[in-house]
Amino acid sequence: MPFRDGTGPRGMGRGRGMGRGRGLGMGRRMGSSSGENSTKTATIVIDPEKCTGCGKCVSVCPTGALSLVDGKAKVDQLRCKGCRACVAVCPTGAIT
């Protein structure tokens, strides 16, 4: 195999016969065993001690996953897609 990643020209890839299992180029899924119906969510954590409730994260969130509740930012993990725009705009570093 001429390439370091185990692939080569036309048909010499890892698709069949080499390492049957996840993560070795089994078709288009590339290691995913759950298929198209995956509901993977991002994990954004907000430290309520650092959050000042300025709302900058709420205004920048493209999915509407953030809201202010009792003067603190809260994240809806099901709506969050992990773009981390909120992390970039938080002035106190409360979002990780």
Image (cartoon, rainbow, N blue to C red):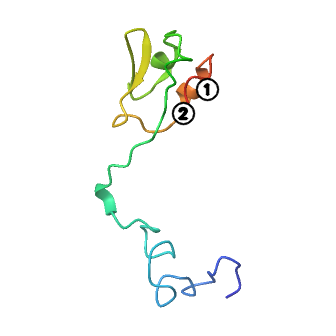
Q: Residues within 10 Å of mark 1 (few under 14, many from 20)?
A: some
Quadrant in the picture for residue 63: top left
Up/down of 40 relative to 92, above or below? below
Question: For the C terminus, which image quadrant?
Answer: top right
User: In which quadrant of the rendered image does the N terminus lie?
Assistant: bottom right
Outermost residue toward the bottom? 17
Residue at left 46%, top 87%? 16
Q: Residue at x 53, y 10 (%)?
A: 52
Disc 2 and disc 1 in contact, CB within 8 angstroms: yes
- In this rendering, the answer to whether 17 lies above or below 41 is below
- The amino acid on which the numbered mark 1 sits, given as a three-letter code, is Ala
Q: Residue at x 61, y 26 (%)?
A: 88
- Furthest residue to the front? 49
Q: Read off the residue under disc 2.
A: 84
Specify the amino acid type for callout 2. Answer: Arg
Percent across and percent down for residue 15 are 48, 82
> Mark 1 sits on what residue?
88
Q: In this rendering, is residue 36 above or below 39?
A: below
